Image (tube, helix red, strand yellow):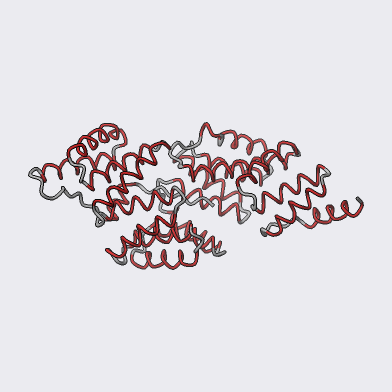
Amino acid sequence: MPARLRLGILAALIACGVVVHASAGQADAAALRDQLSRLGADVYTRPDRLKPAIAELKAILATNPGSSDAHMLLGVAYRTVGSPEMIGEAKAELVQAVELNGANLPARYFLASLYLELGRPAKAREELEASLAQAPGRPQFLALLGEAERQSKNPQRAVELTREALRADAGFAQARYYLALALFDVGQRDEAIGELEQVVAAGPPLVDPYLSLGTAYLDAGRPDPALAVLDAALKIDSARADVHIQLARAYRLKNLTARAAQELLLAAPKTSNAASSGYAQQHVDFDLALETGLLRLQQGRLAAAATALKKALDMEPDHGPANRAMAQVAIRQGAYDQAADYAARAEKAGAPLAEADRARLAARRIAK
């Protein structure tokens, strides 16, 4: 399920306890500190001020290249711009901020967050472990480290770390969100849903908790509550392709195929969130191809289903449900040997064919 919680940057900044420091030894240290504080307020809370803030930060760094805080603010500003080409620039600035001042914990936090967006949990773990060595027990770092462990396929360790973060701060919604994702990964779906329901009950102005809860409801075969939660997500950001994909899935499960098709049109790449990183977009592309294939299969449009499912399998060859659906398509097309191959892969991945399809495939192969 998607795991891309976009926290408000100001909230994360306050959580880390950031203080803007002027570079030591400068005669105008106080003036620089005040300037950076003003620019920080623009970067964290005024997206309309990003362009002039970036220009001013570049000017500061032209004369103060050793300012870790200026590099950090510029990196956050680049990330907030959201365009894919700025992701690399944001990472470079945050890396520079940490190299200049290893005690700049907010810079490490933002860099770790960016590494997770880029699908590099091992690098995120390095930054977070270094931060916790300087600030032991800090719940913000523990929670993010838990998510890094989850993305590294260590969900039990993720559960332990996020629970530790919540013991330090029971009201820390981000930790509860990450705990829910880890609980899903260890197979405790009902408990995970309960954690997500607590997060959503607070009404956060963030899409991802609603999206994750809606997806969880669908995994549990509960499309009606999923529709309500996903509709709430769209009120926050109507352009999120991943929300439209899960809405399509909900409508498909209710056999409302026309509504499902409409949602998939809205999820097309032209409406994808511009802030998505390459790693995040790969998940969206896969989910879109898979859901398109499943819908076309349900509609009996076998050629279209095969095309979409092949695209999904090109991205994730061992995906169980995608292989199972491809086997179903092949059975209906009479390609029984091909169907058997896909069915074997699906079963190996824990997504076996339904008994009726297995019997039909076996009978046809024997008859052949």
The image quarter in which residue 175 lies: bottom left
Residue drawn where x is 51% and y is 33% of the image: 271
What percent of the width, then of the height, locates residue 28?
A: 9, 43
Percent x, y for residue 36?
A: 19, 42
Q: Nearer the viewer, residue 329 or 295?
A: 329
Q: Residue at x 64, y 36 (%)?
A: 261
Q: Residue furthest left?
A: 27
Task: Name the residue nearer the viewer: 40 or 246.
Answer: 40
Q: Is residue 228 above or below residue 304?
A: below
Q: Tell me residue 287's x, y (percent).
A: 59, 44
Quadrant of the rendered image containing residue 268: top right
Q: Residue at x 27, y 48 (%)?
A: 97
Which quarter of the figure has residue 136?
bottom left
Residue 265 at x, y percent in the picture: 59, 33
Q: Nearer the viewer, residue 242 or 280?
A: 280
Q: How many marks?
A: 0
Q: Is residue 303 above or below residue 335?
A: above
